[in-house]
Image: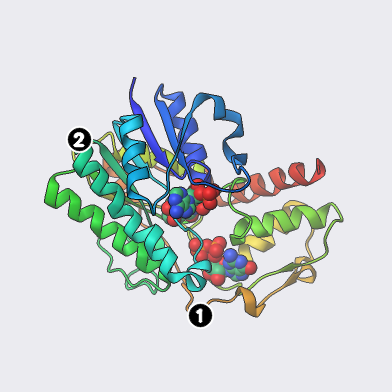
């Protein structure tokens, strides 16, 4: 039985990855950090099948201990301060978690068992103010937020430990991926949840920032399969994971409202709210996943339309039962 350790098991991606690995017969371990109230919402349905180990990205000995206790064949580092907007309010903390946290894990692997295969959750935010379209593995990074900068560090330290110590370390450069389990602060979920509440008569408006930025949005359930595939190859490498299609925030909102039959959607949206605007914006992201397609045999399965519908439907069910 293969063993996997996932950091940040309470997060969106970890919940889908844990399901996938359990299906494949893995023994799954996941780390959680200490919180005053339990936030295991996303893994409630599989909690009895996985083993939780307390550990924090800031605390080296807790990371060492997580590895010693789980003895993993594969380690997926999904933990991070993952919200771009917050990274301007907490830039140092974002660097500690999202950048240096990666080195702490790699150090634990290097000193305890360098044979552990490592996956680092890198991000299309590293491309930021894009220097090439579509963005691929070799596109120059130009991050636009403390989060993006921290992810660039995480990417390069992963590459560096691969080259310095021959650790099987992969960096998955994933474009935005969403699901009904996405955090409520991200724009897709904020919209799907708002639309559901408006449809049910519980709310009238959604307050948003800039509607123009475009993102290459995929489904998280499809993307975790690419993470696993990367660690099954003979050679460790870096891959862009994306859909190759992008849409604006406005298009997302319009489609979400149309899903519930609301066509005069603009009546329900207030845009350019200053508290939701960013000091520096990432205007345009679109990924070229041809390397992943060729080497991993991976391709996205869920269309943009299906993703939006899935999220709105799930939020209607959620809000109906409240
Ligand atoms: P989430 O924000 O849903 O999950 C992040 C996880 O990290 C949570 O379990 C969180 O715990 C945990 N965490 C935060 N800080 C610490 C810490 N100091 N120590 C230990 N654990 C911590 O993110 P996603 O699932 O969406 O993303 C997974 C990874 O992929 C992240 O690294 C993200 O930056 C990256 N990524 C995500 C993309 C996306 O579109 N979703 C795109 C590209 C990259 P808690 O629940 O306690 O807060
Ligand atoms: P990001 O790509 O990781 O920053 O994911 P987000 O979902 O947080 O943001 C995607 C895009 O939506 C960014 O360009 C934001 O500026 C834009 N956006 C517009 N209004 C909002 C809002 O109210 N909340 C968030 N989170 N993003 C918004």
Q: Quadrant of ligand 2?
A: bottom right
Q: Which mark is residue 279?
A: 1
Inspect this view and state whether residue 134 appears: no
Q: Residue at x 60, y 62 (%)?
A: 187
Horizontal side of 258 relative to 105 (left or right) equals right
Disc 2 versus disc 1: distance between alpha carbons?
42 Å
Question: Could you say which quadrant of the image residue 128 lies in?
Answer: bottom left
Query: Which residue corresponds to the image point at 18% horizontal and 40% vertical from the top-left?
Result: 235
Could you tell me residue 270's position as x and y percent? 73, 74
Report which residue position mark 2 lands on.
115
Q: Is residue 141 above or below residue 28?
A: below
Which one is earlier in the sequence, the residue at label 2 or at label 1? 2
Residue toward you, 254 or 121: 121
Q: Quadrant of the C terminus?
A: top right
Residue 233, percent across and down?
24, 36
Cβ–Cβ under 8 Å for marks 2 and 1: no
Disc 1 secondary structure class? loop
Residue drawn at x 47%, y 78% as measured from the top left: 280
Residue 179: x and y, percent? 58, 47
User: Mark 1 Cα within 10 Å, few/some/many (few <14, many 20+)?
Assistant: few
Quarter of the view holding residue 296: top left
Count of marks, rendered view: 2
């Amino acid at each position: 039985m293969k063993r996997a350790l996932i950091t940040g098991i309470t997060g969106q991606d970890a919940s889908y990855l844990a399901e996938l690995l359990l299906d494949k017969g893995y023994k799954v371990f996941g780390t959680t950090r200490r919180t005053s109230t339990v936030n295991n919402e996303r893994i409630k349905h599989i909690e009895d099948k996985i083993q939780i180990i307390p550990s924090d990205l800031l605390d080296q000995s807790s990371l060492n201990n997580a590895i010693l206790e789980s003895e993993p064949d594969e380690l997926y580092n999904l933990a991070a301060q993952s919200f771009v907007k917050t990274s301007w309010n907490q830039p140092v903390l974002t660097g500690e978690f999202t950048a240096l946290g990666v080195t702490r894990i790699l150090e634990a692997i290097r000193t305890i068992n360098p044979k552990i295969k490592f996956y680092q959750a890198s991000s299309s935010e590293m491309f930021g103010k894009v220097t090439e379209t579509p963005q691929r593995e070799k596109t120059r990074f130009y991050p636009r937020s403390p989060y993006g900068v921290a992810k660039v560090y995480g990417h390069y330290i992963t590459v560096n430990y691969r080259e310095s110590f021959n650790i099987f370390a992969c960096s998955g450069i994933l474009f935005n991926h969403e699901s009904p389990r996405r955090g409520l602060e991200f724009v897709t979920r904020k919209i799907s949840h708002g639309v559901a509440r408006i449809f049910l008569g519980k709310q009238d408006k959604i307050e948003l920032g800039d509607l123009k930025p475009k993102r290459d949005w995929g489904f998280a359930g499809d993307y975790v399969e690419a993470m696993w595939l990367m660690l099954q190859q003979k050679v460790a490498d870096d891959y862009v994971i994306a859909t190759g299609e992008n849409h604006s925030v406005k298009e997302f909102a319009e489609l979400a409202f149309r899903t519930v039959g609301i066509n005069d959607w603009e009546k329900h949206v207030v845009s350019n709210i200053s508290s939701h605007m960013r000091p520096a914006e990432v205007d345009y992201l679109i990924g070229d996943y041809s390397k992943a397609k060729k080497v991993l045999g991976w391709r996205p399965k869920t269309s943009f339309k299906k993703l939006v519908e899935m999220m709105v439907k799930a939020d209607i069910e959620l809000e109906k039962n409240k």
